[in-house]
Amino acid sequence: MYSTLPDRPLNVAVLGASGAVGQELLLLLQERHFPVAQLKLMASSRSAGTTRQWSGEAITVEEVTAQSFKGVDLVLASAGGSVSRQWREAITASGAVMVDNSSAFRMEPGVPLVVPEVNPKAALEHRGVIANPNCTTILLTLALAPLAAHRALRRVVVSTYQSASGAGARAMEELKGLSRVVLDGGTPVSEVLPHPLAFNLFLHNSPLQPNHYCEEEMKMVNETRKIMDLPDLRFSATCVRVPVLRAHSEAVNIEFNEPFPVEEARHLLEQAAGVELIEDLAANRFPMPIDVTGRDPVAVGRIRQDISDPNALELWLCGDQIRKGAALNAIQIAELLIAS
């Protein structure tokens, strides 16, 4: 077991560099002045040979092979679960740390599932692989953790409103294109998503499980329990795709074992790392996707007493799915290993 990254500029590889999250990783490595000595960009044969601009130079995307990770210290992987599983052994055998954005290893015993503001110490227990949680889970736990530190959680019920970015760059482009089709009076036909998202919404299209919850909903249930070390937390989720380009929203009902004064909860969230309070009761103004697109914080607001349960609160949140919901969280995990 090893916990830290070398105390020097790092050789970093981005696996899945051509995707929406991969491109955001490149942007954030530069914005956050991450200590990069050498940057390697890797993708499938389809994207190999293309170039990406980074820090003033054009870097050619390489097709990933078993030899690609020689001399690499850190691999930021965002190419899907099957690709992550395929190259895991080669990555760890090379001595690199893999921060993986797919669902491949999230629930695997011994693999930390980390949101740096929530459970940073878990990252130091890795054995070469650290899992980045699902986007909706990351955003949710940032709001839950400050409250759970002061009152025990009893039950969480969440409904998500998930943007096209959760399905990747092609889905985002499809939403733009089909919106034009609808505005021009045409009939939208989806090729990327199972149903047209333009001027429409539909329940999340991940596979239904035997309990009739979809895979995305069960990710939220299981991952939240693991991150917060609450294996018996009562939790129910309904996930919906909505015609928003790249920021997710969530309506959250949180039940505690005792009453939680709204003003106390508001103060705790206002002070919480990674959280921004947007709440103007007089103007009826609360978080919207446009408030967080391209930004780091998760915006929380409309915190109120649940009128049906004296021990429960309601709140609303929005967060950029590509940024904090994926790329930023991965880089923050890597920063934890450097700081330690």
Image (spheres, rainbow, N blue to C red):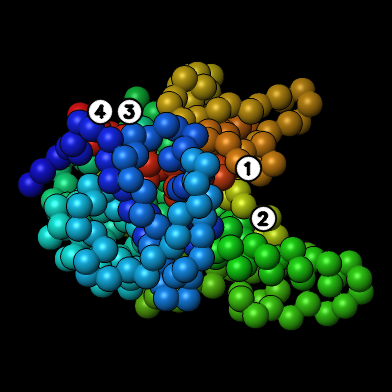
Determine the secondary structure under disc 1.
loop
Q: Is residue 287 visible?
A: yes
| Residue 86 figure quarter | bottom left
Image vertical order of residue 87 relative to residue 289, above or below: below
Task: Report the Cα–Cα distance between label 2 and label 3.
Answer: 33 Å
Q: What residue is pinned by disc 3?
A: 149
Determine the secondary structure under disc 4.
helix
> Is tag 3's residue or tag 4's residue first in the polypeptide sequence?
3
| Residue 142 figure quarter | top left
**Residue at image x 79%, y 26%?**
283
Q: Is residue 99 visible?
A: no
Task: Report the Cα–Cα distance between label 2 and label 1.
Answer: 9 Å
Kind of residue at disc 2: Leu
Task: Report the Cα–Cα distance between label 3 and label 1.
Answer: 28 Å
Between circles 2 and 3, the one closer to the viewer is 2
Q: What residue is pinned by disc 1?
A: 293
Left or right: where 140 falls relative to 337? right
| Residue 15 figure quarter | bottom left
Q: What residue is pinned by disc 4?
A: 339
Residue contact at pointers 2 and 1, CB within 8 angstroms:
yes
> Is tag 2's residue or tag 4's residue first in the polypeptide sequence?
2
